[in-house]
Image: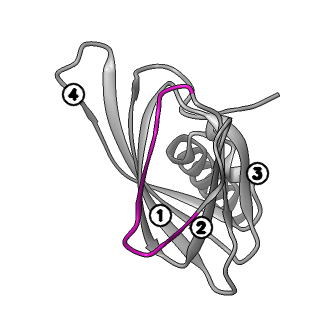
């Protein structure tokens, strides 16, 4: 009976985590990159919602080229992050710096520092669409 309860407990935990992390975002597969959803709300614009998340990057780790079904507003919390937006020169941001990424624009982010880096990402996106789509 104890083994059965353990299996149920583990299965429930995996289910909750997979729902919370929105596996379509791909962060669960990114070793050294962790996304923590902080809040999600419907907004007055029909068909849109806002999602706010903290993204933590271990030194040297990155999220490859991807896009979102809406805008992303980034605030760097700590460390040094390099952002590459398709068609633009790469920029390196430090704690306190901000960046706006237009809807559907492919971009990547990489921790180029020697310590952990983190950003606060606010997405204004279409509801019921994958939050993150990796560039093929």
| Residue 43, percent from left and from top | 21, 27
Q: Residue at x 69, y 73 (%)?
A: 112
Furthest-bottom residue in this view: 114
Magenta segment: 92-104
Residue 1 seen by the camera: no
Q: Which residue is mark 4?
A: 43
Compared to residue 95, the image places residue 104 above or below, namely above
| Camera-side mark, 1 or 2 | 2
| Residue 68, percent from left and from top | 54, 31
- The answer to whether the residues at label 3 and label 2 have Cβ atoms under 8 Å apart is no
Q: Quadrant of residue 45?
A: top left
Mark 1 or mark 2: whose residue is earlier in sequence: 2
**Distance Cα–Cα, label 3 vs label 4:** 29 Å
Furthest-top residue in this view: 46
Q: Residue at x 41, y 21 (%)?
A: 126
Instruction: For mark 2, give the secondary structure.
Output: strand
Mark 4 or mark 2: whose residue is earlier in sequence: 4
Q: Residue at x 64, y 86 (%)?
A: 115
Q: Which residue is mark 2?
A: 81
| Residue 58, percent from left and from top | 68, 75
Mark 4 or mark 1: whose residue is earlier in sequence: 4
How packed mark 2 is, by other alpha carbons closer than 10 Å (few <14, some 14-19, many 20 or more), is: many
Q: Residue 29's mark?
A: 3
Mark 1 or mark 3: whose residue is earlier in sequence: 3
């Amino acid at each position: 009976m104890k083994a059965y309860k353990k299996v149920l407990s583990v299965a429930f935990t995996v289910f909750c985590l997979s729902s919370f992390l929105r596996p379509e975002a791909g962060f669960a597969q990114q070793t050294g990159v962790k996304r923590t959803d902080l809040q999600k709300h419907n907004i007055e614009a029909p068909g849109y919602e806002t999602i706010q998340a903290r993204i933590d990057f271990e030194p040297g780790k990155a999220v490859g080229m991807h896009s979102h079904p809406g805008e992303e507003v980034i605030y760097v919390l700590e460390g040094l992050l390099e952002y590459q937006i398709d068609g633009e020169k790469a920029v390196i941001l430090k704690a306190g710096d901000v960046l706006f990424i237009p809807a559907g624009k492919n971009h990547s982010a990489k921790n180029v520092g020697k310590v952990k880096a983190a950003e606060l990402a606010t997405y204004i996106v279409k509801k019921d669409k994958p939050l993150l789509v990796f560039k093929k």
